[in-house]
Image: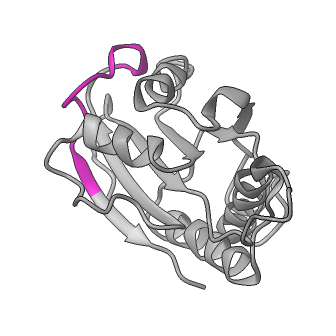
Amino acid sequence: MTDAHPETRTLVLLRHAKAEPGGDGADDADRSLSARGDADAAAAGAWLAHHGLLPDVVICSTARRTRQTWHGVAMGMTGAPPEGGPTGPSPTVRYEPGAYDAHPEELLALVRTVDPAARTALLIAHNPGISLLSALLDPEGLDEEGLRTAELAVHASTHGWAELGRGGAPMTGRHTARG
């Protein structure tokens, strides 16, 4: 799944896991994960660990369901809470309000700010922006339906984060995590 080329950067895009339905006047950003979503997030983390895709940097929307998705992914990667664990040091985690309800260009702008030393970044966000970003990075990579809940799209690029752009990161893997 990972490329042996030392300059390769890997961007993993993850649509948040399954959330409880909205309604009753509640703010959409406050929706929690469902029980299935919790299990799927942990399964996504286990898949990332199994494929050697542990992130150096995590960019996460500030919505409750994306923060809970990250917590589940971290638990799945390490078998421990997201403060680090048996797989090594914990990544730098950035909770970004701008990742909520973002257009693909806005998500790409966040990715372009990743530390140049980082080799793997994980972006946890929402549809349609996350799916449209995947399509922007690799126009041949996704089908019309885009990313499902707890689905990961792995993109690889030999460009630096700041230079990442349209068509510049082919999709090298895709997985729908189910717990």
Q: Nearer the viewer, residue 52 or 44?
A: 44
Q: Would you place residue 131 above or below residue 174 in this image?
A: above
Q: Residue, x 73% and y 75% (percent of image)?
A: 38
- Single out the residue that lies furthest toward the left: 140
Residue 79 appears left or right of 59: right
Q: Would you place residue 73 above or below residue 155 in this image?
A: below
Image position, residue 142 (x, y; %): 24, 56
Image position, residue 52 (x, y; %): 47, 59
Image position, residue 65 (x, y; %): 74, 57
Q: Would you place residue 14 above or below residue 136 in this image?
A: below
Residue 139 appears left or right of 173: left
- Quarter where residue 40 is shown: bottom right
Image position, residue 125 (x, y; %): 58, 46
Q: Would you place residue 144 above or below residue 165 in this image?
A: below
Quadrant where the N terminus is found in the figure: bottom left
- Give the total of numbered labels: 0
Q: Residue, x 52% and y 39% (percent of image)?
A: 121
Residue 83 appears left or right of 173: right
Q: Nearer the viewer, residue 107 or 21?
A: 21
Quadrant where the C terminus is found in the figure: bottom right
Whether residue 167 is in magenta: the answer is yes
Q: Nearer the viewer, residue 1 or 40?
A: 40
Magenta residue span: 160-172
Q: Residue, x 73% and y 46% (percent of image)?
A: 89
Whether residue 58 is in magenta: the answer is no
- Quarter where residue 133 is shown: top left
Q: Residue, x 41% and y 14% (percent of image)?
A: 162
- The colour mode here is one colour
Task: From the image, give the main secondary structure of the stretch colored magenta.
Answer: loop
